[in-house]
Image (spheres, rainbow, N blue to C red):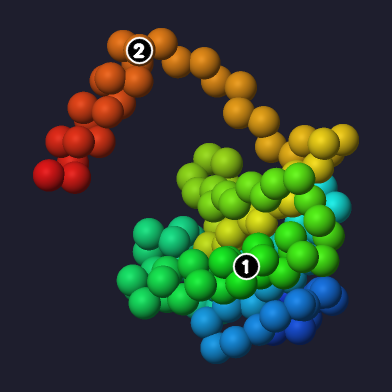
């Protein structure tokens, strides 16, 4: 397989691993958005979290909570952003979560899209129709 995350998890590419279990591994991002940016990478090769089992997603949420607490205690950021990209924004098609510490002088991710009320209502209705 030509997946860079699979190669990293298999040890073919060097990594800075801070946690590992049977389901996932937490590594330092090689191209961090801010200081302390880590990735929680699923060991199972699926493209996004919605393709993983409910048990796997629940486990990854627990790991995310634990690692977030460790980042906050060790690096003392002003905040923390948690992100899973999929589709067009996903550079590597292998499920992973970003934990990005935010600092007053290092903003990390900024959400700049401004939608009007009609746009938000249309998206609300579309999502509501699928969830019912």
Q: Sort mark 2 into few (<14), some (14-19) or many (20+) by Cα contacts within 10 Å.
A: few
Residue 5 in view here: no
What secondary structure is found at the residue carrying circle 1?
Answer: strand
Find residue 18 and report its image quarter. Answer: bottom right
What secondary structure is found at the residue carrying circle 2?
Answer: helix
- Residue lying at the far bottom in this picture: please name it: 22
| Image label count | 2
**Which one is nearer the viewer's eye here, 82 or 2?**
82
Q: Which numbered disc flags the more N-terminal residue, 1 or 2?
A: 1
Mark 1 highlights which residue?
40
Find residue 65 and report its image quarter. Answer: bottom right
**Vertical arrangement, residue 99 with respect to residue 111, above or below:** below
Q: Sort mark 1 into few (<14), some (14-19) or many (20+) by Cα contacts within 10 Å.
A: many
Measured from the top left, where is residue 76 in percent x and y? 81, 56
Mark 2 highlights which residue?
117
Which residue sits at x=81%, y=42%? 103
From the viewer's perspective, tell me whether residue 52 is left or right of residue 37.
Answer: left
**Which one is nearer the viewer's eye here, 78 or 2?**
78
């Amino acid at each position: 397989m030509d997946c860079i995350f699979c190669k990293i998890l298999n040890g073919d590419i060097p990594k800075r691993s801070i946690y590992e279990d049977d389901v996932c591994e937490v590594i330092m991002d090689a191209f961090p958005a801010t200081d302390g940016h880590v990735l929680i990478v699923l060991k199972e090769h699926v493209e996004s979290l919605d393709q993983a089992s409910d048990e796997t997603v629940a486990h990854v949420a627990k790991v995310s909570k634990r690692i977030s607490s460790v980042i906050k205690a060790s690096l003392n950021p002003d905040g923390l952003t948690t992100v899973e990209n999929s589709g067009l924004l996903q550079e590597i098609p292998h499920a992973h979560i970003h934990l990005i510490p935010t600092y007053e002088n290092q903003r990390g991710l900024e959400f700049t899209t401004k939608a009007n009320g009609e746009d938000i209502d249309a998206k609300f209705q579309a999502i509501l129709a699928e969830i019912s």
